[in-house]
Image (spheres, grey):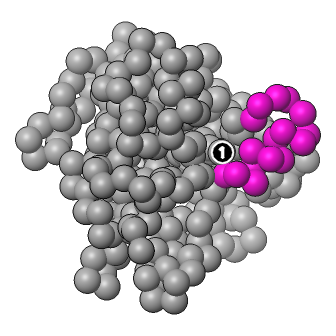
Amino acid sequence: IQNYSDRTFEERNFVRYGLKRGLKYQKDISMNPFKYGFAGGTDNHNGSPGNVEEDNYSVGSHGLADQTAENRLNNSIDGWATAYDINPGALTGVWATSNTRGAIWDAMMQKETFATSGPRIKVRMFGGFEFRDGYNSYEAMVRAGMQRGVAMGGDLPTTHDGAPTFMVWAAKDPMGPNLDRIQIIKGWVENGEMKERIYNAALSDNREVQSDGSVTPLNAPVNLETGAFTTDKGAPELSAVWEDPDFDPTQQAFYYTRVIQLPTARWTLWDEIREGVQYPENVAKTIQERAWGSPIWYTPKQ
């Protein structure tokens, strides 16, 4: 068995670095070429886009190279990765005013989109300066977001002096496990250095963020004999109104939301259970799927 696990991943390989680099370009040359909206997709060579469920990966994603469990155990994909390094793929969600081609394209142009690592998780975020501390329903939150703030993919207004507030909401995949938490990722440039911070905005199971920013992890294991996930932990829906505690009105910044699901069986575990193969010890048997909402940007007053 060939092993490609020594491949090196650099920070610049990831979209978060691109977002930070965009802020630095904005500071250096007054233009941000990396104001990305988020989308997810597949690199599926089987002609089955959207087939991203871990428990439905029985024919792989690269034709003859990984169509059986034995292929996935022993083959490589074009010499750059072992077949068991490959994942089913991701999905794109769009918040559109109607299920029409025009409305969907308009929403994509506005970057009111989100990506998931595969599950049908839903996530939404609004940013602004005039939100209440809480809302009693998803509908009330959306109305306030549309009337008093900006949606994912937008730019915060520069007419306010205080810290921005973000309303975040997420709902689980109806067929999947509950949600663990909602986080907000912030990026900014300080003294020429690109920086980032992860904040926990909403937690399941009545947990609270500690003074050092840490969170007690949930004990929600996957049954390695059956592939079943934990059903009595987590939350089917999470929401919060979060204010940046470290806001500096002189710094450009972006904010985006990340939703983390409880652990589930990776397709490699399903292969071991159903097909009787045995992957190397360093191959993950479980994963924590997630979703990411497009960023909202803040630019200081000129």
Identify which residue, 264 or 196, lies in the foreground: 196
Task: Please tell me whether mark 1 sits on a helix, a strand or a loop.
Answer: strand
Residue 217 seen anywhere in this rendered image of the structure:
yes
262 relative position to 277: left or right: left
200 relative position to 113: left or right: left
Q: Which residue is at the far bottom?
A: 29
Q: Is residue 171 above or below residue 243?
A: above
Number of callouts in the render?
Answer: 1
Give the residue type at disc 1: Thr
Residue 273 seen anywhere in this rendered image of the structure:
no
Dot 1 crowding, Cα within 10 Å, few <14, some 14–19, many 20+: many
Whole-percent x, y for residue 298 in the image: 43, 60
Give, as a single range, the part of the protein colored magenta.
Answer: 96-111
Q: Residue at the location (71% across, 39% down)?
A: 94
Whole-percent x, y for residue 164 in the image: 35, 47
Q: Which residue is at the far left?
A: 211
Q: Quadrant of residue 102?
A: top right
Whole-percent x, y for residue 13 in the image: 52, 72
Whole-percent x, y for residue 220 in the image: 34, 23
73 relative position to 21: left or right: right
Which residue is denoted by mark 1 in the rendering?
A: 113
Q: Quadrant of residue 142?
A: top right
Q: Residue at the location (72% across, 65% down)?
A: 77
71 relative position to 130: left or right: right
Q: Residue at the location (63% across, 56% down)?
A: 37
Residue 101: say if magenta.
yes
Identify which residue, 44 or 188, lies in the foreground: 188
Q: Quadrant of the C terminus?
A: bottom left
Q: Quadrant of the N terminus?
A: bottom right
